[in-house]
Amino acid sequence: MRNPLILLPFALAGGLVSAELDDASRQTLLDHLKRSSSEFLESVNGLTEEQWNYKPAPEAWSIAECAEHIALSEDFLRDVVEQKVLTAPPTPERAAQRKALDEKVLAMVTDRSFKAKAPEPLQPVRRFPTPDAALRKFQESREKTVALATSRGDLRERAGASPFSEDMDAYQWLLFLSGHTMRHTAQIREVKANPGFPGNR
């Protein structure tokens, strides 16, 4: 007769819930990060100083201010993932439920009809002396984000409070970060489409 005490560890192991990030999901995230980076950099390529600093209205952000905000937000949002979300207790049993919200997260953060005030640390105040300095900061920060997305297997297992009603797992926070870049790239395109934008007159 088999000893039930010997079988117990195997029974417990079989009951564990795992939400290890699969290769396809990781690639989707990396592709999104690559796309948002490319779209942002393309949107500011070849601008003159006048275009870089043009403001459609006194209260509106210039492209320089949008770019500064994007560059600063990269580290800010990644720090949220690393220091808060990924240090939270794992809840893999809720991973499938959270995963269903991926598209909602992206749709909400990229929706320009929804306005939000940037927190004080992310308000543009001309921290970068040149466009190259702002873009270099963004690219250096994005490399760190990609490294995080590449190296961690528990992005679906840990979640934290989000700007929305539901908690977001670390994977969704990184999607949010990428979508945030797209949101403000769209804002840059709006500035460029303004009738008063230098070169459009």
Image: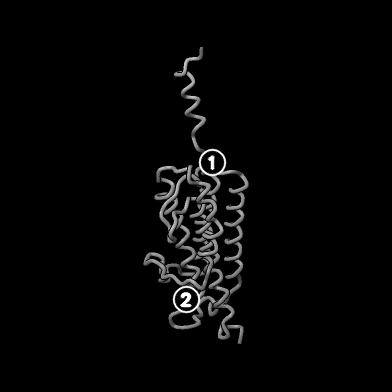
How many neighbours does mark 1 have within 10 angstroms: few (below 14), some (14-19), or many (20 or more)? some
C-alpha span from label 2 to label 1: 41 Å
Tell me which corner region of the image, top left, top right, bottom left or bottom right, holds residue 32: bottom right
Number of marks present in the image shown = 2
Q: Which residue lies furthest to the left in this view?
A: 120
Going by the numbered disc 2, the residue's amino acid type is Trp
Instruction: Say which residue appears at 56% left-offset and 85% top-offset.
Output: 196
Q: Which residue lies furthest to the bottom in this view?
A: 201
Look at mark 2 in the image and give the residue it sits on.
Answer: 61
Going by the numbered disc 1, the residue's amino acid type is Glu
Residue 177: give its label: none
**Element under disc 1:** loop
N-term-proximal mark, 2 vs 1: 1
Query: In front here: 116 or 127?
Result: 116
Residue 20: give its label: 1
Instruction: Say which residue appears at 57% left-offset and 66% top-offset.
Output: 40
Q: Where is residue 127 shown, x and y percent of the image?
A: 42, 68
Q: Where is residue 116 shown, x and y percent of the image?
A: 43, 70
In the depicted structure, whether residue 82 falls above or below residue 74: above
Q: Do the residues labelled 2 and 1 touch (CB within 8 Å)?
A: no
Q: Which residue lies furthest to the top in this view?
A: 1
Q: Where is residue 161 shown, x and y percent of the image?
A: 41, 55
